[in-house]
Image: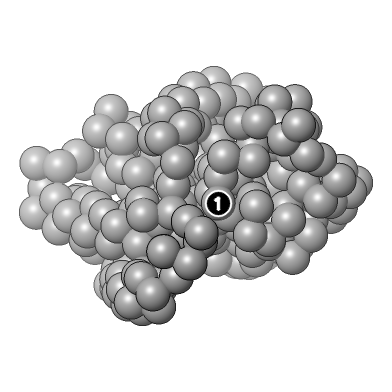
Amino acid sequence: MSESLTLPDAAPRSGRARLLTAAGILLLAGTYAALVLTQPEGLVDGLGQGVALATFGAYLAAALLLLGAALPQLPPAALTLIPVALALNILLGQFVGYTLIPLYVDSIGTVLVGFLAGRRAGAATGVLGILVWSLFNPTVLPFAAGAALIGFLAGTAARFGALRRVYLAPVAGLVTGVIAGVVSAPVAAFVYGGTAGVGTGALVGAFRAMGDSLLGAVTKQALVSDPGDKAIAFLVAALLVYALPARLTSGFGFVRRYRILARRSAG
């Protein structure tokens, strides 16, 4: 009975969600393209710089559009999950950035939200995490589009069965890592000169010593680091999802609709 009462509203709601999602993705892609093509000065000097403030505003607007598309489908649990995911991303990313590990480990929270709440929520979480992080580490701001892509791909992977067998999650992570690495490489090259993080910077230096151009070296580093990094993030996030009570995971409409955890029940 309750399903029949909500059915007439489904089409308009879906149409609004698609429109908001399309607008958010276009704004993300447009901002990313503008940064890569113009390589503006002062971007990583903090929000006191006009270009940094404009970039922050554009990415924030994109995140809000994506969140607006996802919110009607999110249970109250998701509203508490997203801030926890943001904190997890920032704490792990900040810590690993100062180690010799050639990984990032800054997307586990984003992937977790994508797994449970879908592509829009995952993408919005990725952008919001970078925006919050950029308030005290402005150099991460240009990577917001890449973070959104990871959340979007995590939701896509879950939708098509990557969590129905735990071993499929890291495989999906490997694929996501290749895509994310190619997307992030141009930003890493012009923002950091390829030296973001101690471990990843060492890899870039090694490739440069072999005669590669800066962009070529950063791309190679990304294709070495990102697939493994995202495989770990997807596996850890999948294990976290399976560790949650079935009653909690079944509260997410995305999980129920696409049978994300096909073999679990809420009983």
Q: Nearer the viewer, residue 259 or 112?
A: 259
The residue identified by callout 1 is 253
Q: Position of residue 260 (x, y in %)?
A: 72, 52
Classify residue 190 by image quadrant.
bottom left
Q: Position of residue 204 (x, y in %)?
A: 64, 49
Classify residue 100 by image quadrant.
top right
Left or right, 83 with respect to 147, comes to left
Name the quadrant of the C terminus. top right
Looking at the image, residue 87 lies above or below residue 180: above
Left or right, 136 with respect to 178, comes to left
Residue pictured at 65% horizontal, 52% vertical: 256
Count of labels in the image: 1
Left or right, 225 with respect to 50, comes to right
Q: Residues within 10 Å of mark 1 (few under 14, many from 20)?
A: some
Residue pictured at 61% horizontal, 31% vertical: 248
Question: Would you say residue 135 is visible in this rendering?
Answer: yes
Classify residue 111 by image quadrant.
top right
Left or right, 18 with respect to 104, comes to left
Looking at the image, residue 214 lies above or below residue 200: below
Q: Nearer the viewer, residue 68 or 48?
A: 68
Q: Residue furthest front?
A: 1
Residue pictured at 43% horizontal, 54% vertical: 73
